[in-house]
Amino acid sequence: MIDLRSDTLTLPSVAMKEKMLSVKLGDDVFGEDPTVNLLEHKAALMFGMESAIFCPSGTMTNQIAINIHTQPGDEVICSRESHIYNYEGGGIAKNSGASVRLIERNNGLLNHEDVLKNINQDDVHCPRTALVALQNTSNRGGGVCYSNDELIEIKNVCVQNKIPLHLDGARIFNALVEKKQSPKSYGKIFDSISICLSKGLGAPVGSLLIGNKQFINRARRVRKVFGGGMRQAGIIAAGGIYALENNIDRLVDDHKRARIIANAAKECSWIQNVVPVETNIIVCYMKHDKSNKAFIKKLEELGIKCIPFGEGRVRMVTHLDISDMDVDQVCKKLNF
């Protein structure tokens, strides 16, 4: 079975597992796991920021950041397509008592004008605009990326209005390699960054939240409250270290394979159109007389898995466990 449902399905390689079994461990809640400490230091250094904290998931790192940046009753500006709004269980309201100002963009990417016109005035009738949160790449937008120029423009709006800027960087490395940007350039733009190790980078579990020392000190307290404190976590942190050292540059291969599949999908008689591919996500729109559920069932019968992605849409995602041979098979089997 060729599984294109998500890049979260990647399995640790033999080399990654060997590293995980060979590292020194300690109690991370006491700050004494040397491998976790090394991973956090490496991530902070990579982005040119002061500190980082290792957490079980990207949902937790995003929710910790939102909790620190906001107070109950505040408002978060984000895209209607964003992960923090759609896929984190209503955590903004439940965990932080904040509301959202949703910006409508089909590809999920905001621009600085969107941000500026959605900042509330200093008026007792309105919630305080406390945070702007971006996502890069945009999952529901088909893996599209921000340009560096637009990120700087959004940052300038935030600085002028004294509003922190957070990045949900679940697939940040896909964006960085595709746009040929440096992690340190992002460290200069964002006040906090969440990065995921268990998608395209291939680690089995874990995300990091990066920011200044004061912010990360507060994040450790919130992580504890959220139940995210881990003990001998170095065994999974080691997978993250291996991923950062070995699996970033190869993401361009995933992007190339995604484009090949997208081109084949355009020729499928069931598909109306395919969102232009920038990174490793392929989003296909079904023809009006075809259902995505029937399409998914047909593909599974042919040995390929993908997922529904809203009404009349399906998503496929390439990752390090999808080979050129797999791509050839997918392209042949899409010929119906």
Image: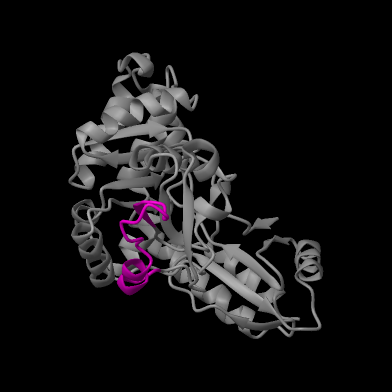
Magenta highlight range: 110-133
Q: Position of residue 309 (x, y in %)?
A: 65, 64
Determine if residue 326 is in view: no
Q: Position of residue 284 (x, y in %)?
A: 63, 75
Up-down: is 53 above or below 268? above
Nearer-the-camera pick, 21 or 146: 146
Query: Could you tell me which residue is drawn at 45 percent across and 36 percent down?
Result: 206
Query: Could you tell me which residue is drawn at 41 percent across and 37 percent down?
Result: 64
Image quadrant containing the C terminus: bottom right
Q: Quadrant of residue 61?
A: top left
Q: Position of residue 167 (x, y in %)?
A: 35, 53
Q: Tell whether 263 sits left or right of 219.
A: right
Image quadrant containing the N terminus: bottom right
Q: Position of residue 40 (x, y in %)?
A: 29, 33
Nearer-the-camera pick, 247 or 200: 200
Query: Could you tell me which residue is drawn at 27 percent across and 65 percent down?
Result: 154
Q: Tell whether 121 sits left or right of 81.
A: left
Asked if the stretch drawn in magenta spans residue 116, the answer is yes
